[in-house]
Image (cartoon, rainbow, N blue to C red):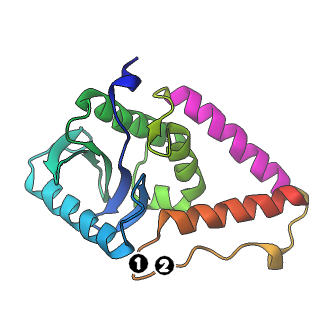
Amino acid sequence: MLLNQIGNIKAVLVLDKEGNALIGKYYNADGMSDSSKRAFEGRLHKASKSNSNSSYENSFFTLEHQIAFYRVYDDISVFVVGQEDDNELVISEVLDTLHECFDEAFTHIIDRESLTNNMTAVILIIDELIDNGIIMTLEAASILERISIKLSDSKGSKKEKVDPKDEEKPAEASGGYLSFTSVFSSAKNSLAKTLAL
């Protein structure tokens, strides 16, 4: 497999039609502030709009010594960003795997509503595919099987006994921007509380 021919994935982003991040997962970006991430997302969105691309097909462009592969859906765009000199086929395959997982998990409806209503599944898919910027697998069936087990375990635990006052509040949004870290932290805390019951 080609996984050893690529450095690290720099980011996985899901942007809405206006370029606002629904999900912003950055890897090895310790020095990037939230405002610089939003600015980068805006530049990605603008560049993707200026490139001619077909809906539901992978397209790419280079930006700031990075290569961004993206796919445009009805009301969202999904981006996978790597270094400019990384293997383009592998980055494109990461995007294809995300598409395949989303398509299967959300019964062939990939849009803003599907992703926001199933944020836990989206986060698990991305985390099973990429860990700290390293591609773990490109096999969608394997990813879907693992997240299915995690989601069913989580739902089974919740049915037993959940006190509403113990549930974690939803992740805070600042200006409509949900940081992946806050969403993931909220989901992780909620799952930990549920499993402790």
Q: Position of residue 49 (x, y in %)?
A: 14, 58
**Which residue does the numbered mark 1 point to in the structure image?**
176
Residue 191 placement, left or right of 51? right
Q: Residue at x 41, y 78 (%)?
A: 176
Residue neighbourhood size for the residue with mark 2, other residues' Cα within 10 Å, grouped as few (<14), some (14–19), many (≥20) = few
Residue that lies at the very extreme toward the front in this rendered image: 31
Q: Amino acid at mark 1?
A: Gly
- Badge 1 marks a residue whose secondary structure is loop
Residue 17 visible to the viewer: no
The residues colored magenta run: 140-158
Please say whether residue 179 is one of the residues in the magenta stretch: no
**Which residue does the numbered mark 2 point to in the structure image?**
173
Residue 191 placement, left or right of 119? right
Q: Nearer the viewer, residue 118 or 11?
A: 11
Residue neighbourhood size for the residue with mark 1, other residues' Cα within 10 Å, grouped as few (<14), some (14–19), many (≥20) = few
- Report which quarter residue 177 is drawn in: bottom left
Q: Give how far apart the Cα atoms at labels 1 and 2 are.
A: 5 Å
Please say whether residue 144 is one of the residues in the magenta stretch: yes
Q: Residue at x 40, y 25 (%)?
A: 3
Q: Nearer the viewer, residue 48 or 76?
A: 48
Q: From the image, which quarter does the C terminus lie in?
A: bottom right
Q: Residue at x 43, y 60 (%)?
A: 23
1 and 2 marks in contact (CB < 8 Å): yes
Q: From the image, which quarter does the N terminus lie in?
A: top left
Q: Position of residue 96 (x, y in %)?
A: 35, 34
Residue 28 placement, left or right of 75? right
